[in-house]
Image (cartoon, rainbow, N blue to C red):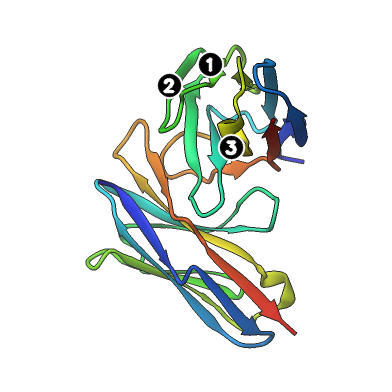
Amino acid sequence: KNQVEQSPQSLIILEGKNCTLQCNYTVSPFSNLRWYKQDTGRGPVSLTIMTFSENTKSNGRYTATLDADTKQSSLHITASQLSDSASYICVVSAGSGGYNKLIFGAGTRLAVHP
Amino acid sequence: EAQVTQNPRYLITVTGKKLTVTCSQNMNHEYMSWYRQDPGLGLRQIYYSMNVEVTDKGDVPEGYKVSRKEKRNFPLILESPSPNQTSLYFCASSLFSGGYEQYFGPGTRLTVT
């Protein structure tokens, strides 16, 4: 069964600190892995998309890693800001050509406190 | 501005009263999709459309209908809403399915009493 699991479920950190969110997946055939940021009550916004051959990708203070052998990904946030408070969703795309199905994790809710 | 729009943003209705949530994108995307999001669960796909006049069921299609008569619009229809359809709904689009970035609308919060 295709599945994406994220940990922790929620996280509280102080402004300026770093944090790392985890994503484990069992998806076949793997196409790509995405991280989204979702502010409360808003639509998800893409942070990164990584294919099988990419093991790291950055978007400003966000750095995603992918280990396709262990089927794990992480999202590292550097020097957190209050505006980083949001849910972070790991999404794995399954398929090869034609229709690719997106499998969503339940998300990690991050709260950044001053 | 490239965007996906949804209307209405908030809706409270009663059981059995037919409703339509509209979705429109201005990016000439072929692929469009509807999701629902419930607390503690990941987004679940309701229906998707690979291109005009082509739609298919996602993971949770029961109680919903869609149509894709033109590329930019992909309305979601609830013929007889029930309380278990109370949820936050998102429309999304991408150039094609696959490795293309998916853009989400702002969401529609639906309450069925």
Q: Would residue B60 be found to the left or right of residue B25 on screen?
A: left
Q: Which mark is residue B25?
A: none
User: Which chain does tag 3 point to?
Assistant: B
The disc labelled 2 sits on which kind of residue? Answer: Asp
Q: Would residue B84 be found to the left or right of residue A21 on screen?
A: right
Residue tagged 3: B92
Image depth: mark 1 or mark 2 in front: 2
Secondary structure at badge 1 equals loop
Q: Of B61 and B33, which appears nearest the observer?
A: B61
Residue at position x 56%, y 46% from top? B38
Q: Residues within 10 Å of mark 2 (few under 14, many from 20)?
A: few
Spatial separation of the CA atoms under disc 1 and disc 2: 12 Å
User: Which chain does tag 1 point to?
Assistant: B
Secondary structure at badge 3 equals strand
| Residue B44 higher or lower than A90, as above or below | above
The quadrant holding residue B32 is top right
Residue A51 at least partly seen: yes
User: Which chain does tag 2 point to?
Assistant: B
Q: Would residue A45 be found to the left or right of residue B57 on screen?
A: right
Q: Of B41 and B43, which appears nearest the observer?
A: B41
Q: Which comes sooner in the sequence, label 2 or label 3?
A: 2
Q: Quadrant of the C terminus of chain A?
A: bottom right
Secondary structure at badge 2 equals strand
User: Are the numbered discs 2 and 3 placed on the same chain, yes or no?
Assistant: yes
Residue tagged 1: B52
Residue tagged 2: B56
The quadrant holding residue A84 is bottom right
User: Are the numbered discs 1 and 2 placed on the same chain, yes or no?
Assistant: yes
Residue B67 rendering spot, x and y as whole percentages? 57, 15
Residue at position x 31%, y 61% from top? A53
The disc labelled 1 sits on which kind of residue? Answer: Val
Spatial separation of the CA atoms under disc 1 and disc 3: 15 Å
